Amino acid sequence: MTGSAKTPRERYRQQVREEVKEKAWQQIAGTGASALSLNAIAKQMGMSGPALYRYFANRDELITELIRDAYRSLADAFIAVGDGGDGGDGGDRGAGRARLAALAQVLRRWALEDPHRYFLIYGTPVPGYHAPQDITAIASEMMSVLLDACTAAGPDPAPGGEPHAFEGHLAGHREWAGSHPDAPPSALRLALAFWSRLHGVLSLELAGHFTGMGLDPALLFAAEVDGLTTR
Amino acid sequence: MTGSAKTPRERYRQQVREEVKEKAWQQIAGTGASALSLNAIAKQMGMSGPALYRYFANRDELITELIRDAYRSLADAFIAVGDGGDGGDGGDRGAGRARLAALAQVLRRWALEDPHRYFLIYGTPVPGYHAPQDITAIASEMMSVLLDACTAAGPDPAPGGEPHAFEGHLAGHREWAGSHPDAPPSALRLALAFWSRLHGVLSLELAGHFTGMGLDPALLFAAEVDGLTTR
DNA sequence: TGTACATCAGTGAACGCGCGTTCACTGATGTAC
DNA sequence: TGTACATCAGTGAACGCGCGTTCACTGATGTAC
């Protein structure tokens, strides 16, 4: 796929890089990203610490790479849903809403699959860290898929007649929806509600705030999805 | 208030403990909780590192104390709103909804006042850390205030006739609402929506996920509050 | 096919750092008679 | 009011640890003729 005709050395390099990242994820799963240690990874791979500097310039580069991979993985999962459904532009509202529901399920599965990976993206920000531009670009890809579905889900002509005040604000502040310059404000609002509500449930769930409460987080999640795709 | 007739030494002890915590918060604001260092705090106070062991058994005890204080502070802010409003039990729905909106504003102000404090409670969990029971008790106090308001806000008899499936689940899983054994399932659901939706917006906002998008998070927050207190 | 050279993966020693925590000790503050 | 003793805050040295990162070097792998 990417850059064919690799020399054996290049292939090996990439292979080792992958193994480093794999061990890094294992370590993050155990003690969190802030405790990520290059030396510990090296030891786990049976190498000496300095050897890793052949593959990553420093600790920060490794972490950035992990964040990038996490975003890429989630974006690909989103895109797969977008491709699977019918075109969208001509689809009826029902199809758009079904696609929204599918995106929600993909998001939840992805989050539960590896909570630490989820928190690497959406958790407490690392002080001083700023994502490079190519990572924000991946985030935009995801938003684009989401906006697709939200637009297809229907403009939801406000039953009362007057659109919500927030939609007025969005009509004038839509830089973030650059990929969909024609999406109605109600679709923009729906996308933001989708994102923030589902993140709210997921991050509380993954952080363990529901444990001991005796309720099933999956049902709360489903209820929120319902609220987003109904009416 | 708590334990009068302190000796001067006890008073001094408590004073130093407070100063330690104050410096700890400053440090957290700068580099996050995971980088909290006892030695650095001591240096900032003009003392040697080991001196702090007169006041805290170890680093973990200090962090637990900070978490406890954070919860206490938010709970007190919630309780102040609850006390301010009219009784509640007899109040009309409008009053309940106004109280919900007030709680939302208090939550947002509290979060913006010190984002790191917010993340200490609601951010990426520290691997292996389990909150002692007295802290979960404080969380219950908050939930109780919230349930008060949600109950007063009205049972919201489902317009379509059939209550949402999730409310059926809640009717049978309400241990977490122990303080309000008679609250209708719709009130329980409202409380969970309040908590998770507002947390969703706030945590995305505080983590900086809206920066560069060109929209005003305060308005998204307000729109979500609106959705919770309308209809 | 074989030799000469360049590339590059990995090692081990070392640097400097800051961490949490313990310990024996000094000196000030409070208490009892 | 003054003396004898107990309490406790704070110090400085020390222990052991792991971290990221650099450096000079060895040995294997690939390339050019």
Image (cartoon, coloured by chain):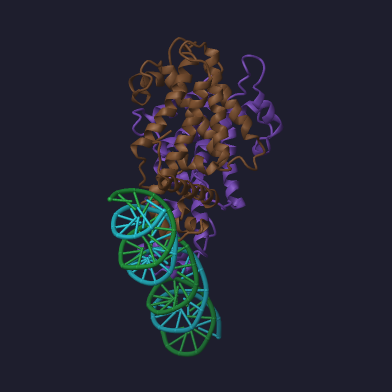
Chain colours: A purple, B brown, C green, D cyan
Picture coordinates of residue A140, whole percent (x, y)? 60, 42
Q: Quadrant of the N terminus of chain B?
A: top left
Q: Taking B49 as reference, is B196 above or below it?
A: above
From the top left corner, tell me how far across and down residue A22 is, in percent: 41, 55
- Residue shown at 67% from the left, 17% from the top: A162
Query: Which quarter of the figure has residue B205?
Result: top right
* Residue A7 appears in the picture as rendered: no
Is residue A100 placed above or below C18 in the rendered structure? above
**A175 lies above or below D27:** above
Front one among D25 and A104: D25
Residue D3: image quadrant is bottom left
Q: On the rendered structure, is A141 left or right of B135?
A: right
In this rendering, the count of numbered labels is 0
Q: Residue furthest right?
A: A172
Determine whether, in the image, residue B47 is placed left or right of residue A129. Answer: left
Residue drawn at 55 percent across, 38 percent down = B204
Q: Is C27 in front, or is A184?
A: C27
Asked whether residue A137 is in view, the answer is yes
Q: Position of residue B67 (x, y in %)?
A: 43, 42
Image quadrant where one finds the C terminus of chain B:
top right
Q: Position of residue B76 (x, y in %)?
A: 48, 31
